[in-house]
Structure formats: C-alpha cells, structure tokens
Amino acid sequence: MTTEQLPYRVPAPVPVRAENRSMTVLAAILWTITVMAVGLCLVVVLMIAVWGAAAEHPAEAGSFLLQVAGVLALAAAVLTAVWYALKLLRLGPATRWAITGALACPGPVALALYVYLGR
C-alpha cells in the first residue's frame, strides 16, 4: 500500500503588530499584579482559617473559607462573561486579556494594600 502525499506549503509568517505587542505586555503586567495581590490575600485568608480552626472553631473557619471561595467564584464568572462579551465585539485575544486584567486588578490590589498596610 502506498500513500499519496499532498504538496505541503509553509505558511507565510504573520507579522506581529506593535499594538498587539504592547497589549500583550500590558496584559502580562496587569495579570501579574493581580495574581500577586490575590496570592497575598489568600495567604492571609488561610492564616485566619488555620487560626480559627486551632482556636476550636472549625465550623466558623470553614464558613469563612466558603465565603471566600464564593467571592472568588463570582469574580471568575464575571470575568469570564466579560471575556466572551469582548469576544463578541471581535477584539483580539491580547486586547481581551488586557481589558479583563484591567477589570480584575483594582479589587485585589486594594484589598492587598489594606491588609499589608494594616489599616
């Protein structure tokens, strides 16, 4: 048995536009800041839950963790809805990442600063 090979052509490289590169950099910066802020907040939340469980209040610690998980799930659902709404507007992926990063950034950063500064 022989197989017939189709002619293969190498596709032309797609030029990267400067605006796409700048949106990618902006998105990376915004999401890095957001992830770091959420990480700090989650460390504090887990410390509070461990202290609550160690103080013989595991039900309250579990309730607290469920509330935090609910807030994170709600935020993820809203950002997913925004992502797909922006996709309907036919924006590029880099632009969608930058816009959702700009929407996701302020809340966790404000909370992290509030926790870090102790006010």
Image (spheres, rainbow, N blue to C red):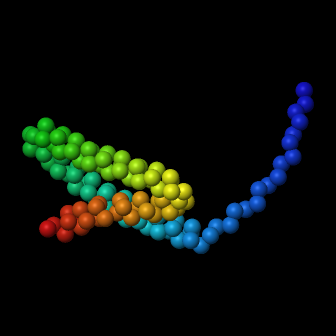
- Front residue of 5/116: it is 5
Residue 21 lies, in percent from the top left, at: 56, 69
| Residue that sits furthest to the front in the current view | 89
Does 66 sit above or below residue 101?
A: above
- Front residue of 31/94: it is 94
Which residue is pictured at 18% across the width and 40% down the height? 62
Which residue is pictured at 90% across the width and 31% down the height? 2
Q: In this view, does 32 lie to the left or right of 52?
A: right
Quarter of the image with the C terminus is bottom left
Q: In this view, does 32 lie to the left or right of 73?
A: right
Residue 106 lies, in percent from the top left, at: 31, 65
| Residue that sits furthest to the left in the current view | 56
- Looking at the rendering, which quadrant does residue 111 occupy? bottom left
Which residue is pictured at 13% across the width and 45% down the height? 52
Does 4 sit above or below residue 41?
A: above
Q: Can residue 36 be seen by looking at this rendering?
A: no
Residue 30 lies, in percent from the top left, at: 41, 65
Which residue is pictured at 90% across the width and 26% down the height? 1
Residue 96 lies, in percent from the top left, at: 48, 59
**Count of numbered circles on the image:** 0
- Looking at the rendering, which quadrant does residue 116 occupy? bottom left
Q: Can residue 106 be seen by looking at this rendering?
A: yes
Does 52 sit above or below residue 90?
A: above
Q: Is residue 13 left or right of residue 93?
A: right
